[in-house]
Image: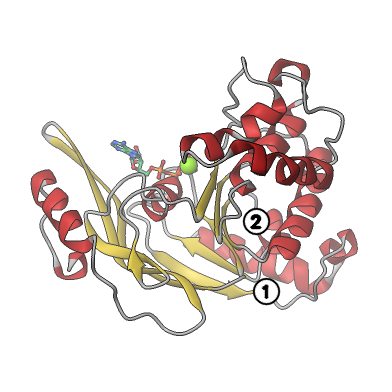
Amino acid sequence: MTSTSTTKDKSSITSVQATATHCVMAIQPGIKLQFKDVSKLFVIGQKSVDALLDVNLAVKSGQFVSIIGESGCGKTTLLRIAAGLIPATTGDVLMDSTPVIRPRREIGFVFQQPVLLEWRTVMENILLPAEIYKFNVKEYRNKAAKLLAMMGLSGFENHYSVQLSGGMQQRVAIARALILEPSVLLMDEPFGALDAITREQMNNELLKIWSISGTTALFVTHDIAEAVYLSDRVVVLSSRPGRIQRIFEIELPRPRTPEHRFADRFTHYCREMKHAMMG
Ligand SMILES: Nc1ncnc2c1ncn2[C@@H]1O[C@H](COP(=O)(O)OP(=O)(O)OP(=O)(O)O)[C@@H](O)[C@H]1O
Ligand SMILES: [Mg+2]
């Protein structure tokens, strides 16, 4: 089991992964994603960076959870481990009781930059995951068209990314992450590059899509107010190595509306989180 492993050498990590391929671990009912004692040490030559330390977190099915913390505290690393893009040094991430050890079609990922293929149209970009997994792409065209409509991008199917604004490109990236109907959606500061007004619009569109799709969302942001507005829970990471400093349950009604941003409770959460981030 990787959770009991303490080794930090790469070859051992590979063999540990291989062992974990077939194992199913106990997970509480209703929990979609569970981080169990997750630590990450990056080793580059003689130097090493402790990025994460003993992260334990259970994300309920259908919840929207945000992760905040100062730059370099390990947020992206945590998301990449959850996506199966890199291994944890010790510990496990379980999805539906199975360790995540490689990218899975049930897990969608939205990067900070939209990373669209500029020689492909909007429609072709959205259909890319279906091609990668060798599904019948034609069957996904309707689904892609529906996602585009939900994103307010109908009519842009045949445009190329250079013909889109930053917000539109990021919406295409979200549609691409949703095309295979992932049950977990991981997002790494997807709106970081957008202006404040577009960002608020994107927040509302994301919430709409999240509530329709029923997906479990794990969202990384630097923006405390964004985290409060979107989330059921907000996890504050300490400075590096990232550990869980505090978890806030956000007791604001849904659906969220822009008015919620002016509620006393909203500003109270923001203030408390700011203090938690300052340690
Ligand atoms: N592939 C890597 N190799 C070596 N060190 C890495 C690697 N990826 C991340 N790190 C280091 O791990 C630490 C955490 O990085 P990470 O990107 O997870 O932080 P972050 O919280 O996402 O920061 P930001 O808010 O600036 O995006 C940093 O010190 C970083 O330099
Ligand atoms: Mg990051």
Label 1: state its secondary structure: loop
With 58 as the anchor, is 142 left or right in this view? right
Disc 1 target residue: 250
With 86 as the anchor, is 47 left or right in this view? left
Q: Which residue is painted at 68% across and 69% down in the image?
A: 269
Residue at mark 1 to residue at mark 2: CA–CA distance:
12 Å
Vertical placement of residue 106 versus 254, above or below: above
Marks 1/2 in contact by CB < 8 Å: the verdict is: no
Q: Which residue is painted at 40% across and 49% down in the image?
A: 74
Closest to the camera, between mark 1 and mark 2, is 1
* Residue 260 image position (x, y, % from top left): 84, 66
* Residue 132 image position (x, y, % from top left): 47, 35
Q: Could you tell which of marks 1 and 2 lies nearer the N-terminus?
A: 2
With 55 as the anchor, is 245 left or right in this view? right
State whether residue 7 appears in this view.
Answer: yes
Q: Quadrant of residue 4?
A: bottom left
**Any mark on residue 224, and which?**
2
Label 2: state its secondary structure: helix
How many other residues sit within 10 Å of disc 2, few (<14), some (14-19) or many (≥20)? many
Query: Residue type at mark 2?
Result: Ile
- Could you say which is closer to the camera, residue 179 or residue 90? 179
- Could you say which is closer to the camera, residue 220 or residue 274? 220
State whether residue 55 appears in this view.
Answer: no
* Residue 139 image position (x, y, % from top left): 65, 43
Q: Quadrant of residue 157?
A: top right
How many other residues sit within 10 Å of disc 1, few (<14), some (14-19) or many (≥20)? some
**Any mark on residue 81, and which?**
none
Quarter holding the N terminus is bottom left
Query: Residue type at mark 1?
Result: Ile
Q: Which residue is painted at 66% across and 43% down in the image?
A: 140
